[in-house]
Image (cartoon, rainbow, N blue to C red):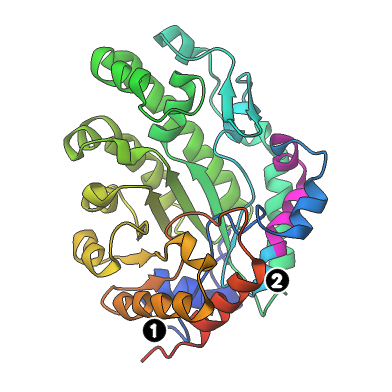
Amino acid sequence: MTRPADALAGPLAGSAFLKAVRGEPVPHTPVWYMRQAGRSLPEYLRVREGVAMLDACADPDLVVEITLQPVRRYGVDAAIFFSDIVLPLKAVGVDLDIKPGVGPVVAEPVRTVADVERIPDLTPEHVPFITEAVRGLVGELAVTNGGTPLIGFAGAPFTVASYLVEGGPSKEHARTKAMMFGAPDVWDALMRKIAGISAAFLEVQVAAGASAVQLFDSWAGALTPADYEQYVMPHSARVLARVGQLGVPRIHFGVGTTNLLPLMAEAGADVVGVDWRTPLGHAIPLVGDRAVQGNLDPTLVFAPADVMTARAAEIVEAGRAARGHVFNLGHGVIPSTDPDQLKRLTEFVQSYPVE
């Protein structure tokens, strides 16, 4: 699968977001928000009414509309593809669903190598709706706010594996770690399988026109650095290496990963996402000569506007020490967030002096 030759040329190449992730001078600090596509927006709740999450993710028209909503409302510098980390598994035939208030639930959790082997590899033929949605989005985004890049999205192998092994969300990841430590052959087979699926899912998005990608490792913070380096990092690196061949910037983000930041950078990221628990100034030396993304505490959007913007200013100032800085929350938008407050935050960051 090849990247269109002119995909990073033209007006998007000069976008603040793509300049920042490449470490180039920017006209303003670019800003976008994880989980900006939906959750808190009334227009999102209207179009999602009566539509299950995975059904929405497989409807190209809905994906285009939902992805565009925050770009229209906030004027953010990048769009994030509306999807879910388990969608590729559903597409290849894994029996799972997203239950409201619970999260992804897998009917038959993975226990053996035979279970892994029954999971097909992902091909573009499994997800034609993704290609259609991305192409539609790229066309719309080219004329939105003067041209807005699209970020492709996939779950990292450890996080996806946790859902497959646990059968659903878990705080302790006990079964996951039991397999990792006690059945390394099954673990390795599963992680290789998921790495292949995640990489292929990102490749489909990039081939259709996405300008960058984010690999999202929600649960990696449950690991020690030594265990991450041995059991997880090689598989995330495999995903990032495959996508890197397509010439797009790669963002790597995890939650609670202060102790893993150097390894997450080493895995192949061009940009390392930093959650709100780690001061950005502390994180920047840990990731090497790379751009960073983050990292306002999502709850600060509920604070008075002057408190929120004062904290945002501190983050923008700290980001100057990095090769490049993309402003974001330190995790996703909270569903009860006031959209008007996010609009204020966006305008504040974009208008903050770059020198």
Q: Residue visible at 54% across and 38% down?
A: 85
Question: In this picture, is 44 found above or below 162?
Answer: below
In this view of the protein, can residue 266 be seen by the observer? Answer: no
Q: Earlier in the sequence, mark 1 or mark 2?
A: 1
Q: For the residue carrying disc 2, how many other residues have a C-alpha within 10 Å: few (<14), some (14-19), or many (20+)?
A: few
Left or right of 273? Residue 145 is: right
Q: Which residue is mark 1?
A: 25
Mark 2 is on which residue type?
Answer: Arg
Q: Residue visible at 45% across and 20% down?
A: 166
Q: Position of residue 227 (x, y in %)?
A: 21, 32
Whole-Å distance between the Cαs marked 1 and 2?
A: 26 Å
Element at label 1: loop
* Residue lying at the far left of the rendered structure: 226
> What residue span does the magenta drawing correspond to?
54-69
Is residue 7 found inside the magenta-colored segment of the image?
Answer: no
Q: Position of residue 222 (x, y in %)?
A: 31, 36
Q: For the residue carrying disc 1, how many other residues have a C-alpha within 10 Å: few (<14), some (14-19), or many (20+)?
A: few
Q: Main secondary structure of the magenta part?
A: helix
Between 145 and 169, which is closer to the camera in this rendering? 169
Element at label 2: helix
Mark 1 is on which residue type?
Answer: Pro
Is residue 63 found inside the magenta-colored segment of the image?
Answer: yes
Residue 73 numbered mark, or none: 2
Question: In this picture, is 114 found above or below 233?
Answer: above
Is the C-beta separation of discs 1 and 2 under 8 Å?
A: no
Q: Position of residue 136 (x, y in %)?
A: 75, 57
